[in-house]
Amino acid sequence: MKARGVLVLAGGESRRLKVPCKALLDFGGQPLIARVVSQALKVSSLIVVSLAKNTSPADFRRVLPGEVEFVKDRFEGLGPLEGFRHGMKRLGELGVEYALALACDLPFLNVEALSFMLEEAEKLGVEALIPRWPNGFTEALHSVYQPEPMGKASDEALNAGQHLIMDAVKRLKQVFYLDVDRLRRFDPQLSTLTNINTRQDLEEALAKLKG
C-alpha cells in the first residue's frame, strides 16, 4: 500500500455563520474539526491541519489528538489555496504519496467512501481524483491528491494571482473526475459531502444528527 495522509483545511473565515472559527464550532457536543479528524484517523495516522496565519494552534491542540500536525499560512488574503499548498508540501515531506484533502465542516464523513477514493486514485495513478456532480460542480475539498505535483501546481497558481484550489487542479496533467453516484454504494444519501456554510446548513445537519 502506498503511503497515505490527510490534509484538513481549517483556516477559512466564517462570515456566513457569524462565528469566530467554524472549525471549532460545536456540533452535537464536539467541535466540527474534531469530528472530521476522528474520521480521518480511520483512514490514515498522518493528519495535517492547515490554519490561518494568525490562528493559535493551542486552541486546536486542546480538542485534537496529539499525533495531529499543524501548518500555518505564511500570507493572508490568498484564500484556501495558501493553506492547501503548505499542507500538501508538508505531507510530501512526510513521504505521503496520496492524500485526502478535506474541509473542516464535513460532519458526516463516510470512511468507506474515503477509502474507496484513495484506492481508486492509487489504482489509476492519477495526480488528483475529485468527485463531480452531474451539473459539473466539483468537491475539491473531499478529494484525493498526490502532494508533490499538487504542491507545485498550487505555487504556480498563486504566483499567477489565482486563489482557488481548482485553479491549481487545472495545472495538473492527470485528473480523474469521479461521478458522485459511485459513492452511493457506501453512502446512499451522499451525506459524506454535506458541508456547513450557513445557519440553515447547521440546523439541518444537527437535525440529521439527532435522527
Image (spheres, grey):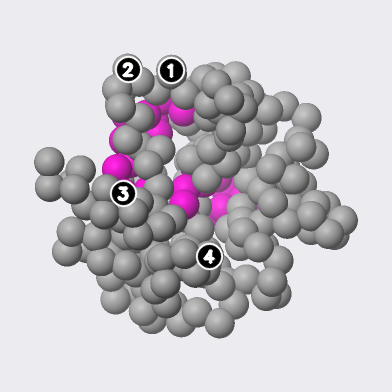
Residue drawn at 42 percent across, 72 percent down: 18
Q: Amino acid at mark 2?
A: Arg
- Mark closer to the chain start, 3 or 1: 3
Residue in front for this viewpoint, 64 or 55: 55
Q: Is residue 143 above or below residue 87?
A: above
Residue at disc 3, secondary structure: loop
Q: Could you say whether the residue bearing mark 1 is in a helix, strand or loop?
A: helix
User: Residue pushed farthest right?
Assistant: 160
Q: Secondary structure at mark 4?
A: loop
**Dot 4 surroundings within 10 Å: few (below 14), some, or many (20 or more)?**
some
Question: Which residue in the structure is indicated by mark 4?
Answer: 12
x and y percentages locating residue 208 in the rendered image: 20, 43
Q: x and y percent of residue 147 in the render?
A: 63, 45
Badge number at residue 182: 1
Q: Earlier in the sequence, mark 3 or mark 2?
A: 3
The residue pinned by badge 2 equals 185
- Between marks 1 and 4, how big is the CA–CA gap? 29 Å
Mark 1 or mark 4: name the one nearer the start of the chain: 4
Outermost residue, front side: 200
Q: Residue at x 47, y 64 (%)?
A: 16
Residue 118 visible in the picture: yes
- Residue designated by label 3: 107
Does 154 appear above or below 33? above
Residue type at the position of mark 1: Arg
State the CA–CA distance, disc 3 to disc 1. 20 Å
Q: Amino acid at mark 4?
A: Gly
Q: Which mark is residue 167?
A: none
Mark 3–mark 2 distance (CA, rounded to whole Å)? 19 Å
Range of residues picked out in magenta: 89-117
- Residue 44 colored in magenta in the image: no
